[in-house]
């Protein structure tokens, strides 16, 4: 019986020994992070004791060397997976950590896989520049990155780095990128230095931006006023400056263009907050020259430039030419302008057919102002249809100025008048013709005649124009006669037709026969018979014309070749008449 019991005990012992040999280490699985804060996080995992009494903990640190761990906790001795979690504390905001679950039993220790978490960070706050700074207000700027946390921001400001004042708080959202922020502060003291910084706060913490400063003032306010002319070579520059609360200096820039090039000495304008006048004398300038002037002022907030003004020094007069007016066929009004430039001035107009001019009008006077005065002078006795040049000449004690050249052309005649021959044989017709300036058909042209010895023109006839305004009319003047044509647009130039008698010379039965044809009677007039002598003519004798204006002349010529002609003298209004040349041979 004792043997049997001993055998049973041995069997039980062997069974127990077999069971111990079959036990395995627990399994550990690292899980995800269930919550993350700036300085803490909750991590999870699973542990399977695999039938042995098991404890577990979490290792964590900024590397896979970990270095820290939580306290151990009991996972039991079951044979199924048990969820576990642990709170990690004392972490640094915005820092990446490694962690893992570790399980231990009598059968051994198991490590879960490495996990990574990053604690949340406090917002970023960057203080920016102050803008829109003036004597009583400024706009403070900056940027805020909420780093994923609901974030608010505000500016602190004051006369020291203790600040003492702050703006209202504003929402920056919960994004992960920087956003621009700004706030305007008012009630500042002019000329005072202010410190300011941006502050951003979230559940992850509060961040203060860097300290920056600004001066509660602005650049000077500058106005350039009109300058005064002091003489041919000097000016008085004027303006005003508001220092806007800062010590300010000011000066004038001046020159013949907006590049200036010269400046006056700088003078102090104080540090007030109201406009203060400033003037300076500009000397050694050029006479009759336009200068540009501007006032410049500078203080701790910057430099301001006044508006540009222009002024012209006195000196030689200024003269310009304007278009001629009242241009007619023989008259015109010449125009221009003169600025006396502060001195008593005289002026006249030069004119002529070329830019050499050659003729001038009488001088006229202007008092010594500095305003430009329009001037004009009439001219008469010009040639119709002719181009003339003119210019204005002005003189004062500082010198003489001539304006630019301009030209004008007098009006041509309203109608032209031409004659087919300047000399008419008595009793024969010559043609008057022309064209109207309008070139219109059926326009009435009135012809006027002034016979030799008459005192005035008398109307001769009227004719109508044909195509293109042309017209023609035949006349038979008895004596030299002047003609003119008239249309609405004006008269033509006068043309004169001279008259000669028609004189013939012929032979009849050995005698020379002279006959004069004329609308005037030549009865009793003398005719001169001449012969060719070398290159001239020699007289053979005078003979009187009979009642019909002819004469038969007996010839007593020596043997030889003769060239003869007859000559009738001038009469009032009629030119002398010369016959044809008669050639004959005496044997």
Image: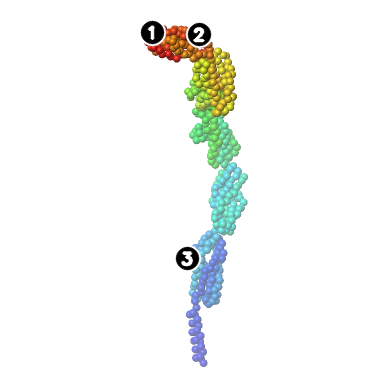
Q: Secondary structure at mark 3?
A: loop
- Few, some or many residues within 10 Å of mark 2 (<14, 14–19, 20+): some
Dots 2 and 1: beta carbons under 8 Å? no
Q: Secondary structure at mark 2?
A: loop
Give the Cα separation between the discs numbered 3 and 2: 164 Å
- Where is residue 215 drawn, in percent x and y? 56, 44
Q: Quadrant of the C terminus?
A: top left
- Number of the front mark, 3 or 2: 2
At a point 50% along the width and 83% down the height, the residue shown is 16
**Residue 121 visible in the picture:** yes
Vertical side of 95 occupied by 436: above or below: above
Q: Which residue is mark 2?
A: 546
- Few, some or many residues within 10 Å of mark 3 (<14, 14–19, 20+): few
Judge by depth and name the residue closer to the eye, 52 or 149: 149
Q: Which residue is mark 3?
A: 65
Judge by depth and name the residue closer to the eye, 235 or 421: 421
Vertical side of 15 occupied by 470: above or below: above
At a point 44% along the width and 10% down the height, the residue shown is 509
Image mark for residue 558: 1
Image mark for residue 214: none
Sequence-earlier tag: 3 or 1: 3
**Residue 350 visible in the picture:** no
Judge by depth and name the residue closer to the eye, 169 or 453: 453
- Few, some or many residues within 10 Å of mark 1 (<14, 14–19, 20+): few
At a point 47% along the width and 13% down the height, the residue shown is 504
- Number of the front mark, 3 or 1: 1
- The residue at the far bottom in this view is 1
In which image quadrant can residue 239 be found? top right
Sequence-earlier tag: 2 or 1: 2
- Where is residue 447 drawn, in percent x and y? 57, 20
Give the Cα separation between the discs numbered 2 and 1: 27 Å
- Where is residue 71 drawn, in percent x and y? 54, 69
């Amino acid at each position: 019986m004792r043997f049997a019991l001993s055998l049973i005990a041995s069997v039980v012992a062997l069974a127990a020994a077999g069971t111990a040999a079959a036990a395995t280490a627990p399994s550990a699985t690292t899980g995800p992070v269930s919550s993350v804060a700036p300085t803490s996080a909750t991590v999870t995992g699973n542990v399977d004791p695999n039938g042995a009494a098991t404890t577990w903990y979490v290792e964590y640190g900024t590397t896979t060397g970990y270095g820290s761990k939580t306290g151990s906790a009991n996972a039991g001795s079951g044979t199924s997976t048990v969820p576990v979690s642990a709170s990690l504390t004392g972490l640094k905001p915005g820092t990446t950590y490694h962690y893992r679950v570790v399980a231990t039993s009598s059968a051994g220790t198991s490590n879960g896989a490495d996990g990574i978490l990053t604690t949340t960070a406090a917002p970023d706050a960057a203080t920016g520049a102050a803008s829109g700074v003036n004597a009583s207000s400024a706009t403070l700027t900056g940027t805020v990155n909420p780093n994923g946390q609901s974030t608010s921001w505000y500016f602190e400001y004051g006369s020291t780095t203790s600040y003492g004042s702050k703006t209202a708080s504003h929402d920056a959202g919960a994004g992960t990128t920087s956003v621009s922020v700004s706030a305007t502060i008012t009630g500042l003291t002019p000329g005072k230095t202010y410190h300011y910084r941006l502050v951003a706060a979230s559940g992850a913490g509060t961040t203060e931006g860097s300290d920056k400063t600004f001066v509660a003032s602005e650049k000077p306010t500058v106005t350039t006023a009109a300058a005064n002319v002091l003489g041919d070579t000097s000016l008085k520059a004027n303006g005003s400056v508001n220092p806007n609360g800062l010590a300010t200096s000011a000066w004038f820039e001046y020159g013949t263009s907006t590049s200036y090039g010269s400046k006056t000495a700088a003078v102090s304008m104080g540090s007030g907050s109201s406009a203060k006048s400033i003037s300076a004398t500009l000397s050694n300038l050029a006479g009759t020259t336009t200068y540009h002037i501007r006032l410049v002022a500078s203080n701790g907030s910057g430099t301001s430039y006044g508006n540009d003004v222009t002024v012209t020094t006195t000196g030689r007069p200024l003269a310009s030419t304007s278009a001629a007016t009242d241009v007619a066929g023989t008259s015109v009004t010449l125009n221009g302008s003169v600025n006396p430039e502060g001195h008593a001035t005289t002026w006249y107009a030069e004119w002529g057919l070329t830019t050499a001019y050659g003729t001038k009008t009488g001088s006229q006077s202007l008092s010594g102002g500095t305003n430009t005065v329009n001037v004009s002078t009439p001219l008469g006795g010009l040639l119709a249809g002719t181009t003339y040049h003119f210019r204005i000449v002005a003189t004062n004690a500082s010198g003489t100025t001539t304006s630019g050249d301009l030209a004008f052309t007098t009006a041509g005649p309203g109608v032209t008048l031409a004659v087919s021959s300047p000399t008419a044989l008595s009793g024969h017709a010559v043609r008057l013709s022309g064209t109207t300036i309008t070139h219109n058909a059926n326009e009435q042209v009135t012809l006027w005649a002034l016979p030799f010895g008459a005192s005035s023109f008398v109307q001769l006839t009227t004719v109508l124009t044909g195509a293109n305004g042309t017209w023609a009319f035949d006349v038979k003047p008895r004596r030299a006669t002047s003609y003119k044509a008239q249309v609405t647009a004006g008269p033509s130039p006068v043309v004169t037709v001279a008259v000669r008698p028609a004189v013939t010379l012929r032979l009849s039965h050995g005698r020379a026969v002279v006959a004069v044809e004329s609308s005037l009677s030549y009865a009793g007039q003398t005719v001169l018979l001449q012969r060719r002598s070398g290159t001239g003519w020699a007289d053979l004798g005078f003979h009187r014309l009979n009642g019909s204006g002819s004469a038969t002349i007996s010839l007593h010529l020596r043997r030889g070749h003769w060239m003869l002609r007859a000559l009738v003298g001038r009469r009032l209004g009629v030119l002398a008449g010369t016959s044809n040349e008669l050639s004959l041979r005496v044997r």
